Amino acid sequence: MNFNWSTGLVTPSSGDYVSVHWYGNLLAPATEDFTFVLSGDEGFRFKFNGKLLINRWDTCCDDMTVTVPLVSG
């Protein structure tokens, strides 16, 4: 997924001071390691299988990556 609001509004009335949560399931096409690339403005968290893997609140706008093993199913 690629969610990029650029300089536009995230909600009808706000382009800043918002929070977004995505929850879901992944169906891996193969059993292998998958790398997620995250970029956020002013902080983000990434949890996978209930484990907090990224907890980044210190800088703006650089990418963070995390690689996790996925099992096809």
Image: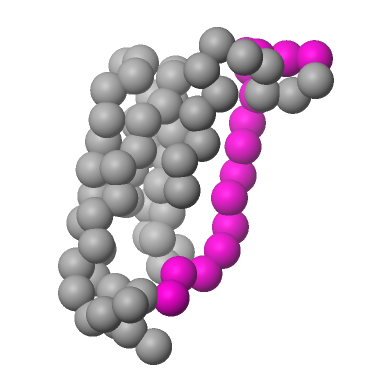
Residue drawn at the location 26% of the way across and 36% of the way down: 64
Question: Between 30 and 67, which is closer to the camera in this rendering?
Answer: 30
Residue furthest to the right: 12
User: Vertically, is 20 above or below 70?
Assistant: above
Displayed quadrant of residue 69: bottom left
User: Vertically, is 19 above or below 67?
Assistant: above
User: Vertically, is 32 above or below 34?
Assistant: below
Question: Between 58 and 21, which is closer to the camera in this rendering?
Answer: 21
Place of residue 8 in the rendered image (x, y in percent of width and height, measured from the top left)? 62, 14
Residue drawn at the location 63% of the way across and 31% of the way down: 19
Place of residue 61 in the rendered image (x, y in percent of width and height, measured from the top left)? 34, 19
Residue drawn at the location 24% of the way across and 50% of the way down: 66
Place of residue 22 in the rendered image (x, y in percent of width and height, measured from the top left)? 58, 50
Place of residue 30 in the rendered image (x, y in percent of width and height, measured from the top left)? 26, 80
- Per the picture, the main secondary structure of the magenta-coloured stretch is loop
| Image side of residue 5 versus residue 45, left or right | right
**Is 24 in the magenta?**
yes
Report the quarter where the C terminus lies: bottom left
Highlighted range, magenta: 13-27
User: Vertically, is 64 above or below 22?
Assistant: above
Question: Between 18 and 5, which is closer to the camera in this rendering?
Answer: 5
- The number of callouts visible is 0
For the rendered model, the colour scheme is one colour
| Image side of residue 28 versus residue 6, left or right | left
